[in-house]
Amino acid sequence: MLNMGADPEPKIYRRDKHGIARNSISRSALKVCEILRSHGHAAYIVGGAVRDLLLGVVPKDYDVATDAHPDEVHRLFRRSHLIGRRFKLVHVLFGSETVEVSTFRAGEGGEADEHGRLLRDNVYGTRVQDAARRDFTANALYYDPHDETVLDYHGGYADVRKKTMRIIGDPRLRFREDPVRMLRAVRFAAKLGFSIDPKTRSPIRELADLLENVPAARLFEEMLKLLLSGHSAACLAQLRKEGLHHGLLPLLDVIVEQPLRERFLRLALEQTDTRIQGGKSVSPAFLFAALLWHEVLAAWKVNESKDMRSIPALYLAMDQVLDAQTDKLSIPRRLTTTMKEIWALQPRLEQRSGKRAFVLLTHPRFRAGYDFMLLRAESGEVPMELANWWTRFQDAELEERNAMLVPDTAPKKKARRRRKSKAGAAPEAAPVQDQVDN
Ligand code: ATP
Ligand code: MG
């Protein structure tokens, strides 16, 4: 109804040209398309999955686009949920796999803010319109399982072959509509080894500040995707290159300036990438604890220099760093609780005396705290001997453990006796959760 002229025709690539083997496609995604089709609907595999299949990469997950309304999709699949985030989507569940089904959308006609940012994008449309509202040409290919063709409205097929990320339409307009697309460009380029098309790339530096208008929770989600892409180091390097790092995380502003900091972060990111590439899971809390650790260290030092006792100074530093971070990119509470536990364990791991060492072994976050300390040791922040001690202590028999204990030499009692905490923080043995209220 919006488009009175004839719809543009897509280029069609057949099986012998695109080379995507049917058996390399998720059976769940095929099933979703087949069922929709058997009920008279159009249904295609779209987005990153088609791009990845063309590249011979195993897709992380599958998206399906259809002309069926979300309620209809939900009705057709018993094991499905209607998801109402920014737009209405349906998640169809197959065991541990989820296929995301979205209804063709028009992309235009939604409300925008004063910077041109689309506040809503939930006007249904045709397949042509759905292709035009997608972000990059490589992400706008439609695979039709029925006849095994790939439909291409925006030259995405050629761009995938040329390894180019190219935004659809006018770059300025599209980045204004949704500044997160700038981060997506960087993530895809770094992850897939693509280059960003010069015209797409050129306004990014100038528009970088628009990220400030993006809700902090969405920025966090995108940042997490970037860090868990398996190419986090490359992504961060590229963010810097495009001038997109300011204000996202303070660490990105300073990452290059301090060698120790950089070594620690590099190790943390490398470890994350290796785990992801090896199909292992990564704890976002651990990762963010690492990303902000040197901020915490710096604030801790400042607080101590103001004559605060060490542990209250650390707790205060943790809150200061997280508070400063929240405006830009809000780290969800479920993560900050764990991050604080990991941080709070660090000074405790430096004590290897008596009961304390044994108590630490039973701490629910001991493993994460220990892994974190290993990272600190590898980057030269604490002696490797300390890390090795804990490695041995964990596996040792009781008798050997007792023999390993290091006498408590710190003049703790005296220092602690009557100097009441100025910050009013609880003593160090208290669980972290009781102390933080943000
Ligand atoms: P991956 O899942 O590998 O990270 P993807 O391309 O599938 O990459 P998704 O976030 O899963 O990315 O989104 C699926 C598709 O939805 C994209 O390929 C793109 O076509 C479209 N899309 C996602 N986010 C946007 C956006 N901000 N603007 C326009 N289109 C988008
Ligand atoms: Mg996807």
Image: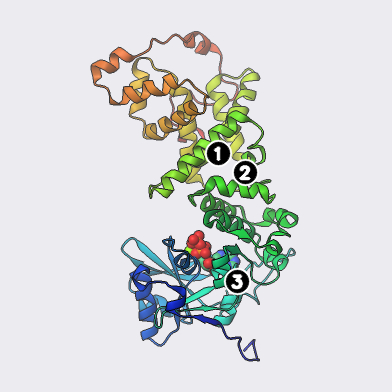
Q: Nearer the viewer, mark 3 or mark 1?
A: 1
Would the CB of label 3 be found within 8 Å of ligand 1? yes
Quarter residue 90 falls in: bottom left
Q: Are marks 2 and 1 in contact (CB under 8 Å)?
A: yes
Q: In the shown orientation, is residue 390 left or right of residue 332?
A: left
Quarter residue 323 falls in: top right
Q: Give coordinates of residue 61: x percent, y percent.
A: 43, 63
Pick the front one: 139 or 110? 139
Q: Nearer the viewer, mark 2 or mark 3?
A: 2
What kind of element bears circle 1?
A: helix
Instruction: Give the residue drawn at x 49%, y 8%.
Output: 411
Residue matched to label 1 = 291
Q: In the shown orientation, is residue 399 left or right of residue 206?
A: left
Residue matched to label 2 = 249
Does 402 appear above or below 431?
above
Residue matched to label 3 = 121
Q: Amino acid at mark 3?
A: Asp
Q: Name the quadrant of the C terminus.
A: top right
Quarter residue 274 falls in: top left
Q: Say few, some or many: other residues with alpha carbon within 10 Å of mark 3 (under 14 / 14 to 19 / 20 or more).
A: some
Instruction: Give the residue drawn at x 50%, y 67%.
Output: 51
Q: How many marks?
A: 3
The residues tagged by marks 2 and 3 sit, at their Cα atoms, a distance apart of 28 Å
Q: Amino acid at mark 1?
A: Leu
Q: Give coordinates of residue 215: x percent, y percent.
A: 62, 56
Q: Name the quadrant of the N terminus.
A: bottom right
Q: Amino acid at mark 2?
A: Leu
Q: Earlier in the sequence, mark 2 or mark 1?
A: 2
Instruction: Give the residue drawn at x 55%, y 39%.
Output: 291
